[in-house]
Amino acid sequence: MALRIERIDFKPWGCFEDLSLNFSSEAGEVNLIYGPNATGKSTTSRGERSLLYGIEAQTKDNHSHDYGDLCIGARLSLDGEVVELSRRKRRVGSLVGTDGEPLSGDPIAVALGGLTEDVYRGLFQVDHETLVKGGVDLLKGGGEIGASLFAAAAGIAALHDTLTTLDGEAESLYNPRGRSSVLHKALKQLRESEKGLRGMVLNPSRHASMTRKLVKAEEASESLSKEMQEIELQARTIERRRTIAPLLDTHAARTEELAELGDVPELEQSAATDRSDAQGRLRVGRAQLKRAQGKIAKLGEEVGAIEINDALIESLKSPRPLVTGASARASCNRLATAWQARRRSSASESGRSRHCGDRRPPAGRWIAT
């Protein structure tokens, strides 16, 4: 792609606040910019390069204006097509159109076709500083006239420094007289890896032997799996037997008890109810018996506590005249009460079914009025 600068505008740039340079000359004509020192020739040259490659981050052309105000406009001819654009000092989107909006692409970079800024500076912007560096580079050539002339002609002032750097890097990569270079280390590692690879390679005979061993191992594994299944089945059977063993023992004991009973008559359907009723009556009878025994014991204690006058009893055995009076009646009543209590106690001890003899005091002798 052909690139031609028809006009360049510094608005502002360096010492220029608003300056336009028109380069729209006829074909075959040359535009020459000249002037005394400190009139802006180098500033114009840096402005042209900044238009093509962008304004440097630490440019020295902001001595009169702020960074944000620096702007280089231009009218370019790209393959005969006129393009108006401007270059601002920005990290991103520094190339803007006439409306001030960043362009979607960079037509200048496309037109330069990969030409770097350093090469452009060496070929098209030779200033006093570049000439001084070129002379120093010729002195560094050390008799290499061809390289020095090439560097000088191409404007590559640092060619010898670059070659020296490349030689140093090449020596660090490979030094025939040394063993610590990168290439020597890489070759050593390669030989070790190849040796390990040879040890890991499996030859056919070894592969066949390992295949036979694998088949035998699989057969043994299958046999062991079947054996394990049988053992697990036996273990489950033993566990079930261990679980029901107490039930089996109980069943056997009940079977023996049933055999000892022999022929057991069949009971009526009401046998369970009758048995339950009988047990209930038995519990009631036992409770009543317990209460009766408690009463008997209490009455026995009361009888044992009565003091009997033996002399009086002996005197009553013989006929006596009729005794009258309140004291006689009281004595007779006490004797009758004690006699009845002793009689009831004796009857309870002998049982309900046993008949106790009728022991009464002699008639006609216990009369009190």
Image: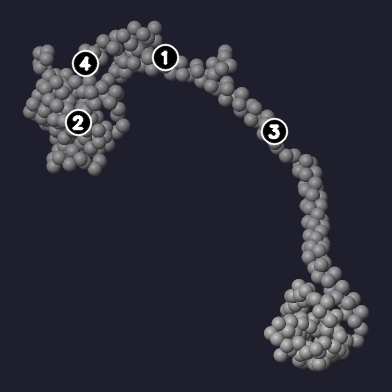
In the orientation shown, which residue stands out farthest toward the front?
321
Q: Position of residue 137 (x, y in %)?
A: 33, 11
Q: In terms of secondary structure, where does tag 1 sit?
A: helix
Q: Is residue 336 above or below residue 169?
A: below
Give the CA distance from mark 3 to mark 1: 42 Å
Q: Position of residue 122 (x, y in %)?
A: 27, 20
Neighbor class of circle 1 (other Cα within 10 Å; few <14, some 14-19, many 20+) is few
Apparent side of residue 160 relative to residue 336 in the rendered image (left or right): left
Q: Position of residue 127 (x, y in %)?
A: 21, 15
Numbered label attached to residue 164: 1
Q: Are marks 3 and 1 in contact (CB under 8 Å)?
A: no
Give the CA distance from mark 3 to mark 4: 63 Å
Give the CA distance from mark 1 to mark 2: 36 Å
| Quadrant occupied by the N terminus | top left
- Give the mark nearest the N terminus, 2 or 4: 2
Numbered label attached to residue 89: 2
- Give the mark nearest the N terminus, 1 or 2: 2
- Give the mark nearest the N terminus, 3 or 2: 2
Q: In terms of secondary structure, where does tag 4 sit?
A: loop
Residue at x-position 78% and y-position 89%: 322
User: Looking at numbered disc 1 in the image, what kind of residue is underneath it?
Assistant: Thr
Mark 3 or 2, which is nearer the eye? 2
Q: Quadrant of residue 51?
A: top left
User: Looking at numbered disc 3 in the image, what kind of residue is underneath it?
Assistant: Arg
Numbered label attached to residue 198: 3
